[in-house]
Image (cartoon, rainbow, N blue to C red):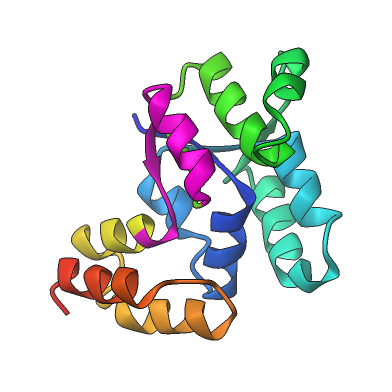
């Protein structure tokens, strides 16, 4: 059983390209912390569609929201990372989950230093391609770029190469 704790940017990115469902299609259990939920649902107005889609996924029990118990640890780690990113890492540790879905490089570095497996939006698209949940990666990468998601030319080209496109 593959359980993951997900941060806000992968949810927003997948929502923008109409593929939030890949989370519960690829993983057995998808969890988000209260801070991640709040950031998406009550945060920036630009993420309105993502907020509605996330609320629906939570209501339909495709994504579960949890409360991080060790708030003092969250407070200690906050600063270098956003609260949601910290709660993803601390919450995953509390829940005994080894995989975190997170895009931010600094957050990924910390998670990997703590021996978590990390995957981001691009990794999810590659996994979806490998497991035949999608047939092509390029249209989704292009949609991500079009929606303002920052992907370097090197990462874009490398992703397409890894996808065999």
Residue 30, x across and y down, in percent: 52, 40
Is 146 on the left-hand or right-hand side of 132?
right
Of the 4 image quadrants, the one containing the C terminus is bottom left
Residue 140, x across and y down, in percent: 41, 78
Of the 4 image quadrants, the one containing the N terminus is top left
In front of the other: 16 or 110: 110
In front of the other: 48 or 56: 48
Question: Can see residue 98?
Answer: no
Residue 112 among magenta residues: yes
Is 7 on the left-hand or right-hand side of 130?
right
In front of the other: 10 or 86: 86
- The residue depicted at 66 percent of the width and 30 percent of the height is 87
Residue 42, x across and y down, in percent: 86, 54
- The residue depicted at 46 percent of the width and 52 percent of the height is 23
- The residue depicted at 52 percent of the width and 75 percent of the height is 17
Is 142 on the left-hand or right-hand side of 157?
right
| Looking at the image, residue 130 lies above or below residue 27 | below
Residue that sits furthest to the left in the current view: 164
Magenta stretch: give its range: 104-122
């Amino acid at each position: 059983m593959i359980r993951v704790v997900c941060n806000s940017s992968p949810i927003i990115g997948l929502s923008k390209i109409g593929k939030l469902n890949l989370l519960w299609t690829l993983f057995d259990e998808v969890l988000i912390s209260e801070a991640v939920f709040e950031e998406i649902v009550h945060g920036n107005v630009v993420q309105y569609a993502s907020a509605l889609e996330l609320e629906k996924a939570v209501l339909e029990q495709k994504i579960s929201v949890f409360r991080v118990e060790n708030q003092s640890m969250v407070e200690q780690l906050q600063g270098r990372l956003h609260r949601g990113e910290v709660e993803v890492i601390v919450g995953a540790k509390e829940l005994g989950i080894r995989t975190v879905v997170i895009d931010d490089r600094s957050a990924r570095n910390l998670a990997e230093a703590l021996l978590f497996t990390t995957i981001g939006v691009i990794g999810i698209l590659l996994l979806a391609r490998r497991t035949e949940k999608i047939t092509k990666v390029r249209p989704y990468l292009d949609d991500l770029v079009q929606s303002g998601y920052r992907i370097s030319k090197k990462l874009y080209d490398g992703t397409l190469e890894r996808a065999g496109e």
